[in-house]
Image (cartoon, rainbow, N blue to C red):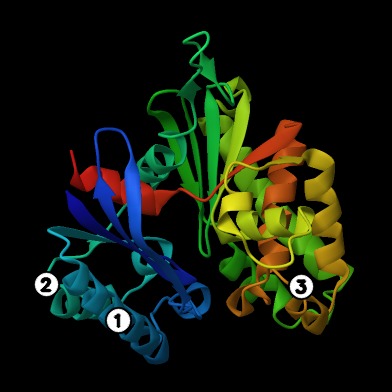
Amino acid sequence: MRVAAVDCGTNSVRLLIADVGDDELADVERLMEIVRLGQGVDRTGRLAPEALDRTFAAMRGYQELIQRHGATATRVVATSATRDAANRQEFVDGVRKIFGVEPEVVTGAEEAELSFTGATRGLLRLSPETELPQGPLPPYLVVDIGGGSTEFVVGSGHAESALSVDIGCVRLTERHLREAGDPPAAPALEAVVADIEAALDRVEAEVPVRRAHTLVGLAGSVTTVAGIALGLPAYDSERIHHSRLSAEQVHDVTRRLLAMTHGERAEIPVMHPGRVDVIGAGALILDRIVRRFAFAQVVVSEHDILDGIAWSLAT
C-alpha cells in the first residue's frame, strides 16, 4: 500500500510517501521545507498571511508528488502553531483545497502517540543468534522537540503516558532571544532555561519519565545537534539515524551553539538555513532534559510523527 503523510508543524512542513509492508516502511519520497508557519503565533495568537502563503506553496508542490507517485491514501496532520491560532480555519480551508482531505489539527496527546509509534517501531530487532531483542531497552522516553511545543511520551510497545508542553525552538526564540544580542546575553538565556524548567516540573509531575531506560530524541533540533556532535561534513540522515550521543556531547554542542553568532552558526555544515536562528533554543531544551532526568545518552531518531502518520494509514 502506498501512502502519503504530511506533517505541518510550527517551523516546517514535511512529506513522506512510502510503501507500507508487514513491518516496514519503504521511503519513496521524504521531504522537508522550513515555512515557519508559527511566525508570531506566540505573540499574536494568529497565523500570519505570509506564513500561510509559504506553507500552501510548499503543500502544492507536495500534492503534485503525491499524484505523480500514485499514493492511494493521504493524511495531513497539523500541530502546535495551528492548535494555538484563532484563525486556524483559514489553514484548514487552504489545506482541504490543496489535498482534497480535511487536515487534522491533532491534540498534544495524539501528536505524542504518533511520534512514539514512528520513533520506536523499528528500534528493537531480534538477534538471529539469540532471538532476543537487541538495541536500546524499553521503556522509552520519546521526546519530540518541535517549533511550538515538545512532546514527552513514555512507553514500551505503545505509548502509555504522554504530555505536550508549550516549549519549542521557535516559541522560545521569539519570546526571549529575538532581541537578546548576537550571541544572546546571559539574562535572556536564563529566561529560556526558566521556561524550560517550569515545563519540566509539569512533565515530571504528570509523566513517569524516570521509569524510562532509554531517551529517544526526535525532530530537527535533535538531529542537528547530532550532526554537529558527529562532525559530519554535510547532513547525512543515515549516519544520524539511531546514532547515540553522550550527555557530555549534548552539553558541549549546546554550549558551543549558544556562544556563536548567527553568522557562525550559519557556517556549520549540517545546519539547515531555516534552523540557524532557532537551534540555540532547541539545543537548550534537549540539554535541560538530559540534565534534569540524568540520562547518560540520547538515541537520535530520524523517524518520528511523519512515520507514525504513515503507519496509521495502513492500520
**Numbered tag placed on residue 299 in the rendering:** none
Q: Position of residue 34 (x, y in %)?
A: 49, 76
Residue at image coords 74%, 66%: 233
How far apart are the two marked residues, 1 and 2, measured between alpha carbons?
14 Å
**Numbered tag placed on residue 268 in the rendering:** 3
Q: Nearer the viewer, residue 237 or 173?
A: 237
- Closer to the observer: label 2 or label 3? 3
List the residue tagged with mark 2. 100
Q: Nearer the viewer, residue 20 or 147?
A: 20
Q: Position of residue 28 (x, y in %)?
A: 32, 60
**Dot 1 alpha-carbon crowd within 10 angstroms: few under 14, some 14 to 19, many 20 or more:** few
Q: Tell me which numbered mark, 1 or 2, is placed earlier along the sequence.
A: 1
Residue 249 visible, this angle: yes
List the residue tagged with mark 1. 61
How far apart are the two marked residues, 1 and 3, measured between alpha carbons?
28 Å
Q: Position of residue 186 (x, y in %)?
A: 88, 67
The type of residue carrying mark 2 is Gly
The type of residue carrying mark 3 is Ile
The type of residue carrying mark 1 is Gly
Q: Tell me which numbered mark, 1 or 3, is placed earlier along the sequence.
A: 1
